[in-house]
Image (tube, helix red, strand yellow):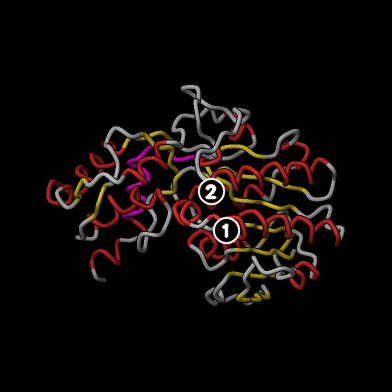
Amino acid sequence: MHILITGAAGFLGQRLVARLLERGELQGHAIQRLTLIDQIEPPSSDSDTVEIYRHAVDIAEPGALGDVLDARPHVIYHLAAVVSSAAEADLDLGMEVNFDATCELLEGCRTRGLTTTRLVMASSVAAYGGDLPAVLDDMTALQPQNSYGTQKAMCELLINDYSRRGLIDGCVLRLPTIIVRPGRPNAAASSFASSILREPLNGEDAICPVATDLAMFVMSPARVIEALVHGAEVPGEALAPFRAFMLPGITVTVAEMLEALRQVAGEQALARVRHERDPRIEAIVASWPARFDIRRARELGFAGDRSLDEIVAAFLAENAPARTGA
């Protein structure tokens, strides 16, 4: 089993690599090779049983994926992306990385006859937008209100069509907002959703740029990684006729996030969150829907978090050494 991961140096990419090495198999076959690509060379990973190839590649460059596709991977995880605020700020960059590179990846698979290769792409709740019903499902019309969501929606349609034609075996996972991310804030408009929990728990200040009654659809990092793994194993016939769907997140308001912070860390931690509204960020995040009927994802075997408290507890357990200075 040969697995290719784009965006392998990123937050999800590194976690996915660790999980695959821990499992040692996918689709019932032993993982023999991992090819990891990103703009910077992905971090090294140790394995006695898996050959690991790491490459610094700009996937926006024409032909950049040729060599890795020549090796005929059985599974491709397409995680590389320019995130929401950055794609909104720079249309050309967002198009080159989020859309053009995906087109080139699909054409590379088609010209090499990789008809049975499972392509798992990370899409986003940002693909939705506009005048939406109170509760959405997977077939709600996509009307994204930002460039990032538009680019992801276009990729979804292409992957579905290439799969319909039997040119690739695609699976598109629409990711909820991921909380709580460790590390530092990134350029995503939703980055604050982790910051307002992570920073105060680490004794640092954070800024909340949106109204506290804003609702978001969220999922923990661990559940997202398990969904990516499972996305490679769902039978293709079960995914048809449309191969993009929303993962089973949960709906929470910013006020509920802040109350969860107060419950686990007290008033002192809550006081570290400053409220400074940012119309640009608020406009992007408020355009994303927060309530979904996720029966299809559950029928396909995808699992979600039980509660916000469970998400926060998982972050605390995983990051306890860093927080205590051990």
The reply, left or right, for residue 213 in relation to residue 178 is: left
Q: Splitting the image into 4 quarters, where does residue 137 fall?
A: top right
**Residue pictured at 24% horizontal, 54% vertical:** 206
**Residue pictured at 83% horizontal, 56% vertical:** 110
Pick the quarter of the image with the C terminus: bottom left
Q: Splitting the image into 4 quarters, where does residue 218 fall?
A: top left
Instruction: Count neighbours of disc 1 (C-alpha within 10 A) and say few if under 14, some if 14 to 19, many if 20 or more.
Output: few
Residue 298 vs residue 180, the one in the foreground: 180
The disc placed on residue 148 is: 2
Instruction: Say what secondary structure mark 1 lies in.
Output: helix
Q: Amino acid at mark 2?
A: Tyr
Residue 120 position, x and y percent, is: 66, 51
Residue 51 in the image: above or below residue 87? below
The reply, left or right, for residue 50 in relation to residue 133 is: right
Residue 78 vs residue 48, the one in the foreground: 78
Q: Amino acid at mark 1?
A: Asp
Is residue 26 covered in magenta? no
**Circle nearer the N terminus (2, 1):** 1
Residue wearing tag 1: 92
Residue 250 vs residue 229, the one in the foreground: 250
Mark 2 vs mark 1: give the one in front.
Answer: 1
Residue 140 vs residue 318, the one in the foreground: 140
Instruction: Count neighbours of disc 2 (C-alpha within 10 A) and say few if under 14, some if 14 to 19, many if 20 or more.
Output: many
Residue 153 position, x and y percent, is: 62, 42
Boundaries of the magenta span: 304-316
Pick the quarter of the image with the N terminus: bottom right
The answer for how far apart the CA atoms under marks 2 and 1 are is 11 Å
Instruction: Say what secondary structure mark 2 lies in.
Output: helix
